[in-house]
């Protein structure tokens, strides 16, 4: 996979982190429709990629600690499974404002990469079944494609079955 340079102002903390790590990645831009019902579904459709390869980044509160779950847009985050994956008891979706403050990104553009304050992260195990996956590059209408093993390594994540 060829690395794409930051052209046209596409540089985000996520792409900067990828460049600093010197891992192969490709940036994919598309025209975001503010009326889209699902950011991830919109990305999959616009890029012509199956929803199982496009992953959404969700921030949850697990026992009082913000935690990132990265799951395919074709499914949903299983909060009980996320809590169990990090040794917690209870999980709920985080307040959107807290997720934005912590990550430095806006909702619909939260990337698991290059977050303002790195959070513990769990990537759904299904990611490892694909040669590459797509995650937000830090802005609505901008995705980054990379190897799932690189995603796991750069986010210091572990993998678990957290999607349903």
Image (cartoon, grey):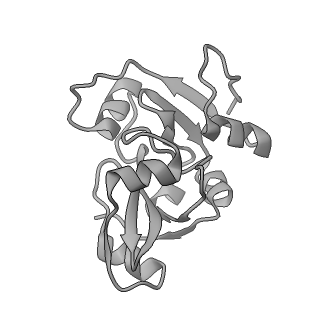
Q: Position of residue 20 (x, y in %)?
A: 78, 41
Quadrant into which the C terminus falls? bottom left
| Left/right of residue 80 with respect to residue 141 in the rendered view | left
Total labels: the figure holds 0
Placement of 19 over or under 21, stated as above or below: above
Residue that appears at 59% across and 56% down:
117
Q: Position of residue 141 (x, y in %)?
A: 42, 26
Residue that appears at 59% across and 23% down:
10
- The answer to whether residue 149 shows anywhere in this view is yes
Frontmost residue, 123 versus 2? 123
Frontmost residue, 135 versus 116? 116
| Left/right of residue 92 with respect to residue 35 in the rendered view | right
Q: Position of residue 56 (x, y in %)?
A: 40, 48
Placement of 146 over or under 62, stated as above or below: above
Placement of 14 over or under 127, stated as above or below: above
Frontmost residue, 145 versus 20? 20
Quadrant into which the N terminus falls? top right
Placement of 38 over or under 55, stated as above or below: above
Residue that appears at 36% across and 24% down:
46
Residue that appears at 32% across and 29% down:
45
- Residue at the far top: name it: 8
- The answer to whether residue 22 shows anywhere in this view is no
Q: Position of residue 24 (x, y in %)?
A: 71, 38
Q: Which quadrant holds residue 17?
A: top right
């Amino acid at each position: 996979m060829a690395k794409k340079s930051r052209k046209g102002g596409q540089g985000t903390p996520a792409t900067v982190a990828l460049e600093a790590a010197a891992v192969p990645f490709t940036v994919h831009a598309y025209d975001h429709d503010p009326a889209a019902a699902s950011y991830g579904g919109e990305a999959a459709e616009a890029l012509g990629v199956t929803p199982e390869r496009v992953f959404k980044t969700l921030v949850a509160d697990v026992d009082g600690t913000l935690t990132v779950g990265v799951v395919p847009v074709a499914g949903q985050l299983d909060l009980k499974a996320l809590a169990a994956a990090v040794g917690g008891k209870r999980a709920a979706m985080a307040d959107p404002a807290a997720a934005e403050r912590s990550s430095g990104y806006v909702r619909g553009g939260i990337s698991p990469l290059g977050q303002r304050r790195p959070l513990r992260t769990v990537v759904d195990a299904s990611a490892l079944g694909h040669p590459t996956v797509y995650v937000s590059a830090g802005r609505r209408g901008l995705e980054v494609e990379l190897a799932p093993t690189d995603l796991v390594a750069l986010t210091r994540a572990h993998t678990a079955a957290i999607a349903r």
